[in-house]
Image: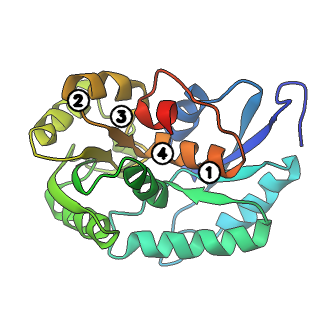
Amino acid sequence: MVDTLAPRGLIGVMTPAMNTVVQPELELLRPAGVTNQMQRFRLGGDAVSDDLIDEALKLMDCNPLAIAVGLTTDAGPDGVTKLAARCAELTDAVGIPVCNASEADHAALRAFGAKRVAVVTPFNAQIDQNVKANVEQAGFTVVAIKGTEAPTLPAICETSLDDIRTVFQHVASAECDAILQVGTALPVVAMIEELEAEFGKPIVACNAAVYWQTLRAAGLSDQIPGFGRLLREH
């Protein structure tokens, strides 16, 4: 479907109900002639979300080209595998490409040819071990990992930019090919350009990665300046 504001098409965006960061961050990245159409879902259990498919079917009423699921599940054991399976079910249900932020992160790292990765998270040291395991299961070596240690999921959205910058500075000293950020409620997109200039390394921020992969899956190849090398060069 196209309309007056989206003559090139619509991108569907889905995010957990409590996440207030995905929507404004992905709005920053929209290419000309494209609009983002939002739908929220609730998290829960091994299925990731019991209402994900039902909510996506509602979103399909506006006929998007593809759907970006603004969620990383690296915090749980085998979380990326579970999210991939759920999104495969969703793809079958809606019949259009569905991308999720965890798998998009790994695709972006591969686009940069990265092997050794430093990781920024919104979590504590214990949960970071799950993140490390999921990233390494995808074929990368985690050489440093540090979280902002948000006490709750809603509190991740409230993390200050100074606190985020401090964690990036902590991991950037490691000998890495790229810095990966997981946790779609952590506001990083507007900082990517600045961080890449400071550290001289590609930054793969999960919200930028899932939007990049979704645009490409939708057949939109725009190079988007101002938000890092991924969207500008790939």
Contact between labelled residues 4 and 2, with CB atoms less than 8 Å apart: no
Q: Which amino acid, by three-letter code, is at mark 2?
A: Gly
Which numbered tag is attached to residue 133?
A: none
Q: Find disc 3 in the rendering and name its residue.
A: 158
Earlier sequence position, callout 1 versus callout 2: 1
Q: CA distance from mark 1 to mark 2?
A: 28 Å
Q: Which sits in the foreground, 156 or 178?
A: 178
Above or below, 48 against 231 in this view is below
Q: Mark on residue 68?
A: 1
**What is the CA distance from the residue labelled 3 to the residue labelled 1?**
23 Å
**Camera-side mark, 2 or 4:** 2
Helix or strand or loop: what does disc 2 sit on? loop
Residue 150, above or below 233: below
* Amino acid type at mark 4: Ala
Question: Along the line of sight, which residue is nearer the eye, 11 or 71?
Answer: 11
Task: Return the disc, 4 or 1, that comes first in the chain's sequence.
Answer: 1
Q: Nearer the viewer, mark 1 or mark 2?
A: 2
- Which amino acid, mark 1? Ala
Q: Which residue is at a point 51% across and 40% down the rendered structure image?
A: 234
Q: Earlier in the sequence, mark 3 or mark 4?
A: 3
In the rendered structure, find residue 209 and report the number of the disc placed on it. Answer: 4
How far, Cα to Cα, is label 2 from label 4? 19 Å
For label 1, the SS is strand
Instruction: Estimate the x, y position of residue 130 in percent, counting from the top left.
Output: 25, 68
Q: Mark 3 or 2 closer to N-term? A: 3
Would residue 33 appear left or right of 110 to someone viewing this image?
Answer: right
Dot 3 alpha-carbon crowd within 10 angstroms: few under 14, some 14 to 19, many 20 or more = some
| Lower sequence index among marks 3 and 1 | 1
Foreground mark, 3 or 4, reads 4
To which residue does mark 2 refer?
200
